[in-house]
Image: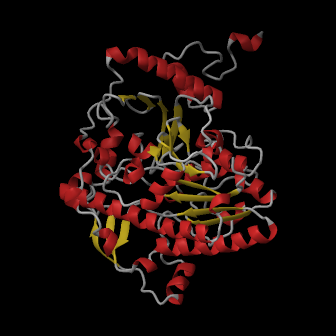
Amino acid sequence: MSQARNILFVMTDQHRADTLGAYGNQLAETPVLDELARTGTRFDRWYTPTAICTPARASLLTGQAPFRHKLLANHERNVGYIEDLPEDQYAFSTDLRAAGYNCGLIGKWHAGTERTAADFGFDGPDLAGWHNPVEHEDYLAYLEENDLPPYEISDQIRGVLPNGGPGNLLAARLHQPVEATFEHYLATRTIEHLERYADDYRSSGKPFYLALNFFGPHLPYVVPNEYFDKFSADDIELPKSVAETFSGKPQVQQNYSDHWAFDTMPIETSRKLIAIYWGYVALIDAEIGRVVDAMNRLGLSDETAVFFSCDHGEFTGSHRLHDKGPAMYEDIYRTPGIVRIPGAPAGQVRDEFVSLLDCTATFLDIAGLDPSPAVDSRSLVPLVNGEHTEWQDDIVCEFHGHHFPYPQRMLRTDRHKLIVNPDSVNELYDLERDPDELLNVYELPDMAEIRDRMMQRLYALLVERGDKFFHWMTSMYPVGGVAYDPSLSGFDDEAYQ
């Protein structure tokens, strides 16, 4: 197998798996990522630990589930959680640096407010926030140096909020050439770092970890003409879950639909939004291609492991929703995940349940370092190498809130998904019969055995992890014998024996 120690990690934001040709989209224009899948390993059950930017990115950095690292919300909508990881928090970049790596991160950070990527040992411009920071001094300098026009938009698309105000901006036409886009700027800065790191690698054997973190295709989808109009709205097939009624579902989902003003826009607008979103993905794919071309030109391809994934998915009208939020549907929890390690089998498709979290241990493994500090992460190297290895046949995801606290836990198995919502009805979906998750079968009598078995399994996994959400489940559901006093009072009999 390959002895490659260099790592190129490409990450997008709010990216649906079904926007890529490699994941079955027949209209997609994603040749670069499709080629990465053809020559590497595509994971079909790759999940985010939580469908929100900051906690997911903190999990990647630390190898810890969100409940453990406790950075649980984006600071822009923070409702009382911590906003930075503590000073003594483990991060994989610390170990890579100590092992002699160059570490670079170009693009979106969004894993803290006071503590920046540089505080964790990453080179690169400090690009804070959740969206393209088009007023950042380094980007403005890039435009000036290359005699490129400034950011300007028109054709804004937004709905109407329940209070009558204008809805969140969902898309707009960008009046800049591709060379002036923030995506092109990020790719350019990444290539510059790659060239410097390649020089160090050739002259002194110093390996590198380099991350390119795009802010897109997160909404608003702001792209130039050729991508705004690349796909015709007439060719877009709406997701089947646009038929969502929210019957038998938690009320918060209808509330979120109202917040994103889905029903205030014509259905033709929803088709256009999806078309623009696909165009945004095509733009990003082309910019990734520039970086891959540079890697090939520099002779690094046979010595560099390449990863592609994102922090979480996006609704784009599915379930009459946009963005993400307190609804644990596949649209935002199942994401693309592709890994190519030189020397490993090409064209693999793996169906194990894996997570963005597992990248952390994989980075350390590739670097020849101990992956055990990434306590909730497991190296994907054996799977990428085509090995048959024991793997957990289900996966747990979690959510803690966005705009307001809203705790949820999810267990996904081969066929079913269970979601525990303490404030409302729980959810159970049969993904074989109902892949669009329209029918909540939690209360159906013939699902009782499956429901109870999954509840017990989720409970056991949360207890094993130390995720104290299980305390709620102890007294509320048939989860088996209780080995502790659920009141935590200390007055149980065992305490006095």
- Side (left or right) of 495 relative to 82: right
Q: Position of residue 414 (x, y in %)?
A: 45, 28
> How are the colours assigned in the image?
secondary structure
Reply above or below: 144 against 55: below
State the image quarter where residue 245 is shown.
top left
Residue at the location (44% across, 75% down)? 181
Q: Position of residue 244 (x, y in %)?
A: 25, 40
Viewer-side residue, 437 vs 325: 437
Give me the residue at 42% from left, 18% from top.
450
- Image vertical order of residue 137 relative to residue 205, above or below: below
Residue displayed at 50% across by 46% down:
347
Above or below 451: residue 125: below
Q: Residue at left 35%, top 57%?
A: 28
Q: Position of residue 9 (x, y in %)?
A: 59, 58
Q: Quarter of the image holding residue 114?
A: bottom right
Q: Nearer the viewer, residue 91 or 294?
A: 294
Image position of 372 (left or right of 381): right
Residue 252, quarter of the rendered image: top left
Describe residue 25's horizontal placement relative to residue 41 as left or right: left
Quarter containing the C terminus: top right
**Residue 36 locus on image (x, y percent):** 51, 55
Query: In the visual, does 203 lie left or right of 362?
Result: right
Residue 266 appearing in the image:
no
Up-down relation of residue 423 to residue 118 (above or below): above
